[in-house]
Amino acid sequence: MNYALHKTPYRICKILTSFMYLQCLAYVCGKAFYNILLHPLRHFPGPKAWTVSRVRYAISQIDGRPHEDLLRLHDKYGPVVRIADNELSFIHPDAWKDSNGHRKGSKPENVKEPLATVGNEHNLFGASLKDHSRMRRVLSHGFSMQAILDQQPLISLYVDLFIRRLHEHCKNGTSPVDMVTWYNRVTFDIISDLSWGEPLGCLAKQQDHPWIAALSRTVKHQMFRGLAMRFPPFSPLLKALIPEELSRGEEENFALAAANVEKRIAEVGSRPDFLESMLRQKGEKASLFVAKPTPHNIWTIEKREMVSNSFLLMLGGSETSATALSAVTFFVTSHPKVMKRLTNEILSAFPREEDIDLHSVQKLPYLLAVLDETLRLNPPLPHSSPRVVRKGGDEFCGYYVPEGTVISIPHWAMYHSSSNFTEPESFIPERWLGDPRFETDQREGRKPFSFGPRNCIGMNLAYIEMRTILARVIWNFEMRLADESKRWTQGQKGWTVWEKPELMVYLTPRDRSV
């Protein structure tokens, strides 16, 4: 056989491979050239390493530190920064109403960016405007302030058990207690009972339910899956690189949600929880769940939507509240003057522990200021959900932005920027009480529960729950931060939610014998 002829297929393959490499290189170079010099967003400031493609921002997200990176970029480039080839980040307070506010006339909304809501297409977080309005109409009654106040007996039941468990584990202040664990347990038990009619049993069994660990994996899986889908045609390969345990976590969460929703539907009329309050509003079980909602029946919701929304309520009503409670505990134990003033307010307002309830805690202004400052310095969600600019383009903070552009408003970066807050890294609750030192603060920029028609439906519950639990803890215990937790906020990774380390606190029961 002719040797040259024998080598021909190999040479052809080598030539084709080289040609493919050259094509890829040409594509990458051409795309980079376009993004830097010709793209409609080329006039917006931003580092070339970020604007040339989406890779640099994706690396920051995978690393869990985009909140820190975005603050550095905004400190350097100003209130609007181009953080990817087709994405802008805004930290000016006006961005909230421009991006998320109610639309005037017939203007369509700037929809949520689809790849940022992967796995949430059938709940309030990721639904279309039409479906969101329908779902929210059905769900909103159960989250009204009066409906929340009506849950006083149920919420008090779990807060009582929570306080009892802290007394059992504190060892009279000689051994530190991990407050992250116990805040997780009480908030998960409360929201599961409100949503499904029964607790997860975390407080009763004094152990975490598997749902809690699975929830953390679910959140990561949804984020990584969304990131992978941003890089076609490499998406299948990138998805395959996501650890299988993250996928299993999502399956476990939704399986448990589906089972509990089915069980709760069968027990309609048994108790006044969120589901029951929705049914009472409509007055008939059959109208709540249908195979497919119709334009003429605005009071319907599909079973898959209820399952998906129950998962969302579990996340929003537990993880975020536990994060805020952990953070406020860290801040007040790190600031003795704040702790002293807060303790005096609580103890003087409540001679007896039974006086602390969902109504009375709303009368404590300093307690609210402490929570507001906590939600500024350590928002439970470090990032907001990005939007896509509507057809025809729109104006944001005085800038015209072309249609199809992704708009982000990073909570953490906005709240930590010196352009919005005086002494932004300092924990000073007085800024929310009219202190003249902070009269230039852009307080309207702090929207930890988002803004507009898609804001968090559980805001009333979160504030009431946090006020009540924190007041009860301070009424019962003197708190001292353990040395190993004195840098608790530093280095936390912020994906969709924070990955929190232990928060070790010495709890000494107050001596009321004097």
Image (tube, rainbow, N blue to C red):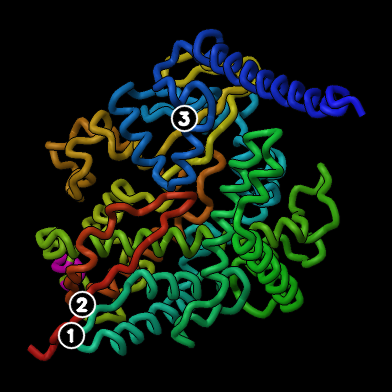
Mark 2 lies on residue: 506
Residue 345: say if magenta.
yes
- The kind of secondary structure element at disc 1 is loop
Q: Going 43% across and 74% down the picture, which residue do you hit?
A: 186
Disc 3 to disc 2: CB gap under 8 Å:
no
User: Which tag, 3 or 2, sits closer to the chain's start?
Assistant: 3
Q: Which of the labelled discs sits on residue 114, or is there none?
A: none
Q: Going 50% across and 62% down the picture, which residue do you hit?
A: 317
Q: On the rendered image, what quadrant is the N terminus found in?
A: top right
Q: Amino acid at mark 3?
A: Lys
- The kind of secondary structure element at disc 2 is strand
Q: CA distance from mark 1 to mark 2?
A: 7 Å
Q: Which of the labelled discs sits on residue 174, or is there none?
A: 1
Q: On the rendered image, what quadrant is the C terminus found in?
A: bottom left
Q: Which residues are magenta?
A: 343-347
Visible in this render: residue 361? yes
Q: Which of the labelled discs sits on residue 97, or is there none?
A: 3
Q: Position of residue 26 (x, y in %)?
A: 63, 16
